[in-house]
Image (cartoon, rainbow, N blue to C red):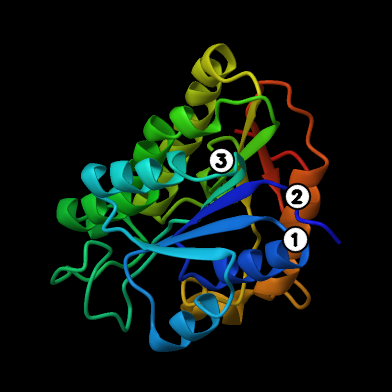
Amino acid sequence: MPMRNNAVLVTGASSKIAQAVIKKLLLLNVSKVYAVSRGFSAAENQWLTSEQRIECLVCDYSEEDIGEVIHTIRAGSFPLTQVYICHGVLHTKNQSKNVNNQSAIEVNPEKRLEDIDVDAMMQVFKANTLTPALWLKHLPSVVKHDKPCVVTVFSARVGSISDNQLGGWYSYRASKAALNMLVKTAAVEYSRRAKNVKLIAFHPGTTDTPLSKPFQANVKPGKLFNAEFVAEQLLTIVANLPIDQQAQFLDWQGKTVHW
């Protein structure tokens, strides 16, 4: 099968879902995958660098480093036709460093108002909201071209304001709700500046990853997905989306989640 003469950007590329997405993309014969992470483990480096179509880019997700990634993509030979922004933190359990690679305040989802800690909340917002916002800020220069492009931002159903019946998880819920508003607002501007682009907020469902690990005991049978299944679902959804300049909030089944 010939190459498709297109490039894909995957940020947060060390996450399990992101790595599953990259593997699926290679089977589709994309010409180039830019895999962006704060750092890659030895095992990740081994398989990522064994594939010539993957370019691994280390980025600390500061605005300067994001700008450098965009510069690298702009200098490339292929237009971006898919972007996957795979950032998210719910807790830092069993982690010695936080999303900024610095000594961390322990983050846990709050069960009551008294659990709110401003520093921990800022840490969650930085990963879940501010970092994706910077990508949305810098992407227009590399996604505006004559080919359709879908930008997928990983969100969560608990970020739906209208769906919130349980309460709790203040920082995570609020950061994902803010992310959803960023996606919806950015889509309005992208519709003027890059009409070939479609923005979606994506809820992957409860996936067997370190993020969900402490809470998997409460997941109903059949509702804990592996990363490969989620990646397959997502790529199928992306392949069939209309480029209509409208933001959508979709789950792993392709069904609409209410904002």
Question: Residue at the location (22% across, 58% down)?
Answer: 120
Foreground of the two, 107 or 47: 47
Between 258 and 99, the residue placed more toward the observer is 99
Label 3 Cα neighbours within 10 Å, binned few <14 / some 14-19 / many ≥20: some
Residue 55 drawn above or below residue 73: below
> Which numbered disc flags the more N-terminal residue, 1 or 2?
2
The mark found on residue 226 in the picture is none
Q: Quadrant of residue 106?
A: bottom left
Marks 1 and 3 sit apart, C-alpha to C-alpha, by 35 Å
Say which element carries label 2: loop
**Residue at image location 86% in from the left, 61% down from the top:** 1
Name which residue type carries label 3.
Answer: Ser
In the rendered image, which residue does mark 1 sit on?
29
Residue assigned mark 2: 4
| Mark in the foreground, 1 or 3 | 1
- Mark 1 touching mark 2, by CB under 8 A? yes
Q: Residues within 10 Å of mark 2 (few under 14, many from 20)?
A: few
What amino acid does circle 2 point to?
A: Arg
Seen from the viewer's position, the closer of residues 193 and 72 is: 72
Q: What separation in Å lies between label 2 and label 3 (alpha carbons)?
A: 36 Å
Mark 3, secondary structure of its residue: loop
x and y percent of residue 198 in the render? 65, 30
The kind of secondary structure element at disc 1 is loop
Kindly identify the residue that appears in the image at 21 percent across and 68 percent down: 101
Asked whether, in this view, residue 146 is left or right of residue 97, the answer is: right
Tell me residue 60's x, y (percent).
Answer: 26, 58
Whether residue 206 is visible here, answered yes or no, is: no
Q: Determine whether, in the image, residue 11 is placed left or right of residue 121.
A: right
Image disc number at residue 160: 3
